[in-house]
Amino acid sequence: KEYELILAIETSCDETSAAIIENGKTIRSNIVSSQIESHKRFGGVVPEIASRHHVEQITLIIEQAMEEAKVTFSDLDAVAVTEGPGLVGALLIGVNAAKAIAFAHDIPLIGVHHIAGHIYANQLVQPLSFPLLALVVSGGHTEIVYMSEDGSFEIIGETRDDAVGEAYDKVARTLGLPYPGGPHIDRLAKEGNESISLPRAWLEPDSFDFSFSGLKSAVINTLHNVKQRGEEVKIEDVAASFQASVIEVLVEKTKRAVNQYEVKQLLLAGGVAANRGLREALEKEFGSSTVELLIPPLSLCTDNAAMIGAAASIQLKKKNFAGYDLNGNPGLEL
Ligand code: KG4
Ligand code: ZN
């Protein structure tokens, strides 16, 4: 057989997804079933509802992914699944589906870290060359990760409080925008002016860490004060000012990390990588520099199983397999 095929499963949060990945880089199929509509009226992901949806969807989604890729279980070299971090009840649905398939068809089982998946989404776009840095920005994570080689992750900076996506969603909620708020703020920011002065949390001069809770509070306080004075503020301007602060800090810290670590590539990863303002700012900063900038297409930025399959291909090479005692681990370390 000339191909290596992995069935990958992702159920860590509110997307049920299954994919077939060929040779770690080609997407044969990538089915994503989003539950956003069911969580919207609660203003965030409700873990119990997420688990129920995963249970209802998982078999159908896996069948669909296999059908679209025209593969059967006997064609598979491994079945990979997001092991953590994420919502434990949600993770368990994917993990148990993967274990059942691995056991029934005697296929190697691979447990994948969700953030490794986000990073390896870039391998579906272009081959990776090391050393590299990845700027990981999602609903649960904000990290700068140094990779000297495949499968080696060193976190050189991370958020000390809120993740970027979390700050986006909280600010959006304050502005009365629907969940998830990130894309709405991104859209409104284009139409507004950066007229509201908001803080930038640089922390210690040599630190690659982030902090976004102060910025979030500053936005909430500003809105409160404006209201108390009986004045009006355009939400487009709030969005533009908030986004400007976030992007300035992300880009500046990334720039310093790139200079210090002398990497070949800079990868953008995670749900907030879908942010148009951030994509444009990084392209402007690194587009003509010696470091190669990789940004996945929008569909591979938010949660999906294809990225899990890409990360799993590295573990398959190293025969880094899991046993049938594989469990969902909400606090799994990278
Ligand atoms: O990676 P992801 O799909 O789930 C996690 O692993 O957390 O990221 C979801 C996060 C949410 O906070 C969402 O608001 C944010 O990504 N997001 C965005 C955009 N699209 C999604 N944030 C800013 N701008 C966007 N265009
Ligand atoms: Zn994610």
Image (tube, rainbow, N blue to C red):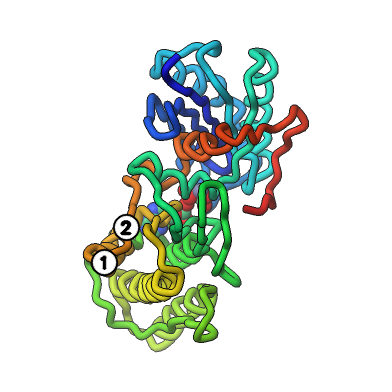
Which mark, residue 248? none
Q: Mark 1 near mark 2, Cβ–Cβ under 8 Å? A: yes
Q: Amino acid at mark 1?
A: Ser
Q: Is residue 301 above or below residue 100?
A: below
Q: Position of residue 158 (x, y in %)?
A: 56, 67
Report crowding for label 1: few under 14, some 14 to 19, many 20 or more residues within 10 A (C-alpha).
few
Q: Is residue 238 above or below residue 152?
A: below
Q: Is residue 123 above or below residue 277?
A: above
State the residue position of label 1.
289
Figure quadrant of the N terminus: top left
Q: Position of residue 197 (x, y in %)?
A: 36, 85
Left or right of 310, for residue 101: right
Question: Residue pushed farthest bottom?
Answer: 229
Please tell me which residue is depicted at 49% across the width and 66% down the height of the picture.
Answer: 167
Badge 1 element: loop
Please tell me which residue is depicted at 35% across the width and 62% down the height of the picture.
Answer: 185
Q: Is residue 127 above or below residue 134?
A: above
Badge 2 element: strand
Count of numbered circles on the image: 2
Please tell me which residue is depicted at 39% across the width and 73% down the height of the picture.
Answer: 259
Please tell me which residue is depicted at 62% across the width and 31% down the height of the picture.
Answer: 94
Residue 49 visible to an observer of this rendering: no
Q: Amino acid at mark 2?
A: Leu
Which residue is more in the foreground, 91 or 34? 91
Q: Quadrant of residue 236?
A: bottom left
Q: Position of residue 114 (x, y in %)?
A: 56, 46
Q: Position of residue 280 (x, y in %)?
A: 26, 62
Which mark, residue 293? 2
Which residue is more in the foreground, 167 or 248? 248
> Which mark is nearer the camera, 1 or 2?
1
Report crowding for label 2: few under 14, some 14 to 19, many 20 or more residues within 10 A (C-alpha).
some
Q: Quadrant of residue 290?
A: bottom left
